[in-house]
Image: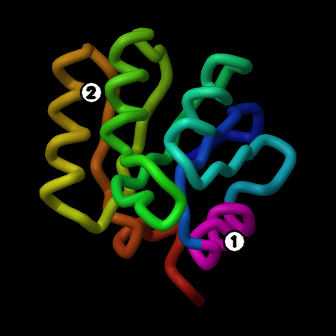
Amino acid sequence: MVGAHEYALVVEDSLHRQLRFLRQLGSTATKIVSRAPDAIRELEARHFDVVFLDRDLVISGGYGEDVAAYLAEIKFPGLVICHSTNSFGAAVIEKTLKDGGINVEVAPFDVLGVFREK
């Protein structure tokens, strides 16, 4: 899914899921944030090839839609994978990104094969 030289931003507020992303993607090319404003700051500060985006960040603040709107505004050139299990929220994010010309895939976290518990 993510190649050896790609930089990934993970926007996720669940510690359990954060650890699973780190285990799968590795820590050297992965930045994890749990709040929408933090994700936007990271996107302003550095290059990422792929963004894994959750919708419900209510534990820590903000929503994935906030990040999606920013990605569409800046015409993010990479891939966005919306991994939210909230199907309504994921559909809103997908539409926002597609309308902005962003390459987006929707793959709920629970069905992302590479992240399944062994």
Position of 100 with respect to 113 (left or right) is left
Q: Position of residue 92 (x, y in %)?
A: 16, 42
Is residue 83 found left or right of 14 in the rendered image?
Answer: left
Q: Mark 1 and mark 2: span between their CA atoms? A: 26 Å
Q: How many marks?
A: 2
Task: Inspect the image, locate mark 2, and give the three-letter code of the amino acid beneath it.
Answer: Leu
**Residue at (44%, 70%) from the top-left corner?**
113
> Going by the image, does 77 lie left or right of 89?
right
What secondary structure is found at the residue carrying circle 1? helix
* In front of the other: 109 or 66: 66
Q: Residue at x 41, y 22 (%)?
A: 70
> Which colour style is shown?
rainbow
Main secondary structure type of the part rendered in magenta: helix
Residue in the picture at 25% in, 15% down = 100
Magenta includes 23? Answer: yes
Q: Secondary structure at mark 2?
A: helix
Q: Quadrant of the C terminus?
A: bottom right
The stretch of residues the image draws in magenta is: 15-24
Tell me where residue 86 sits by quadrant.
Answer: bottom left
The percent coordinates of residue 57 (x first, y second) are: 44, 58
Tag 1: amino acid: Leu
Query: Looking at the image, is 73 positioned above or below residue 4?
Result: above
